[in-house]
Image (cartoon, rainbow, N blue to C red):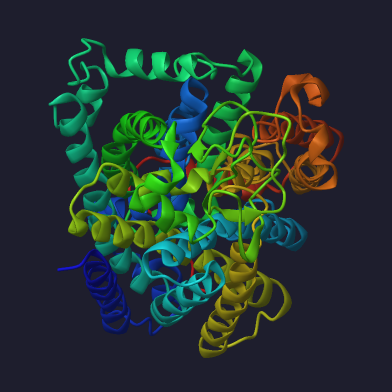
Amino acid sequence: METQTLIYIFVGLSFALYIAIAVWSRAGSTTEFYVAGGGVNPVVNGMATAADWMSAASFISMAGLIAFLGYDGSVYLMGWTGGYVLLALLLAPYLRKFGEFTVPDFIGTRYYSKAARVVAVLCLIIISFTYIAGQMRGVGIVFSRFLDVPIFWGVVIGMGIVFIYAVLGGMKGITYTQVAQYCVLIFAYMVPAFFISFMLTGNPVPPLGLGSEVNDGSGMFVLEKLDLVLTDLGFAAYTDGSKSMIDVFCITLALMVGTAGLPHVIVRFFTVPKASDARRSAGWALLFIALLYVTAGPVGAFARLNFTQTVNETAYADAPEWFTNWEANDLIAWRDKNEDGVMQYRPGDAFEGAPVFALDATGPSGERLLENAPTDNANEVYVDRDIMVLANPEIAQLPGWVIALVAAGGLAAALSTAAGLLLVISSSVSHDLLKRTFRPDITEKGELRAARIAATAAILVAGYLGIYPPGWVAQVVAFAFGIAAATLFPAIVMGIFSKRMNREGAIAGMLGGLVFTLSYIWYFKLWDPSLNVEANWLFGISPEGIGVIGMVLNFTVALTVSAMTKGPPVEIGRLIENIRVPRGAQTPHTH
């Protein structure tokens, strides 16, 4: 059977499964829509949390970043994995003990303030839309290549699928859909990794394969061979890091504490019966996540080695089929600068940003003509980093069914997280803004309708951000973590562990962290990207890691303002003491 036919079958069957689950688990109440009724088994919730967490950034983009960043890419592995340990130990059981529906619910009640709730909703929406842009971009890339449609229409189709099971099923539908999506995505990620590890080293276990000898007779280990191949071409060694220690520390910490402050992850711990189940859920989630994360590093190294050896010094006329497939989707390109008909992969930017293809025009060697390729360096090859995991099976010439499986897995990863984010956005609008702030007399039926309308509007905005994203998938996601670290994380931590923290301090801290972090990212990424170099960064910290400074600013402002203003009411102190009690769980409040 042809590969394209297998792709249609695998993707079609997975979509049919997701939609069937959504119809079966349609939410009939606000409790089911927001927290799946609050009775999800910890193991099931752990698997759903893993799918919610392992987004397009984890499945599609992380290994691609590691492939091209090498040692520097390890910050994503350390930060995103360590964040779950922090979440399990520091926040999850206490938030479940509190018994509310959403993060703004916790902040609004703990800080006895509608203003604090509104600020939390503002932060949540900014974080979620920043994050979701990467997910929809991932959906567009997968559709573009594997289903042979433009990225625009790929995003539109993905929006339609998410609409069906997020708007219909709410958290109840999303939870059980994400269990299915986890099974699809982890199988799709591991199978090609096993194949490629065995082909390169004779060892089918990727982490062990990464430390094994390449079976080409050279007697060299994988990383040793990769370092040699890259340095011979003029690149830095794969195992050398170029980032400063302070930037590595800040990016890793921003990803860690950002994980613990992400609203779509935190809300998953409101779906289990009691506080102890929240901790168990986090443990199971960490186990399920680890399966992919210990494999991502080897996948990145294998991908870079295969890509470099396949592309470099290859005549364009003899380019492998996978190259022309991705070239047709504008995600890989070649510009024959010296007109010798041979692809030269060297250090230096081949293009300023993504390539711009001239319609129906070809260059001297038959390549698709490009309009923005610089001529001041020797590099002729452009590759979108987000394609490496998806292209890996094709580069390694694996069977068609493996390629089809990866396509289904990439879509599962992106759609699962997109759905969780959309639910967070819709619940914050319908529950926190309407029910708890501006229209407390709204009926449950009206609140549910508002939640679905908000989810629909969020899908439209998310689709636009997916079509016009401000960076690579994982890079966009890293900004969301920085914003979460600078806004919600300090407010939640101080809300649990500080009886003195009051509403004035919390509001001032969140706004300070938000304005500073957003301004820094906007200045270097949107206002003038040419300034985005280490010499211009504050303390040498990149936009991906600046959330740590935003977090410190948040804590500093909040504690200072709190010390200068009246403390919280006595009943808030009793509420905090009740949250800290490690036994049982409080029944969710009736709204």
Is residue 75 among the parts visible in the rendering? no
Q: Residue at x 41, y 50 (%)?
A: 323
Relative to the observer, which residue lies in front, 96 or 184?
A: 184
Image location (x, y in percent) of residue 364? 60, 50
Image location (x, y in percent) of residue 76? 49, 33
Relative to the observer, which residue lies in front, 313 or 389?
A: 313
Residue situated furthest top in the rendering: 219
331 vs 209: above or below: below
Is residue 385 among the parts visible in the rendering? yes
Image location (x, y in percent) of residue 111? 69, 51
Q: Is residue 231 left or right of residue 433?
A: left
Q: Is residue 507 left or right of residue 247?
A: right
Image location (x, y in percent) of residue 229? 41, 19
Q: Is residue 160 left or right of residue 288?
A: right
* Residue 463 sits in quarter: bottom right
Q: Residue at x 68, y 52 (%)?
A: 470
* Quadrant holding the N terminus: bottom left
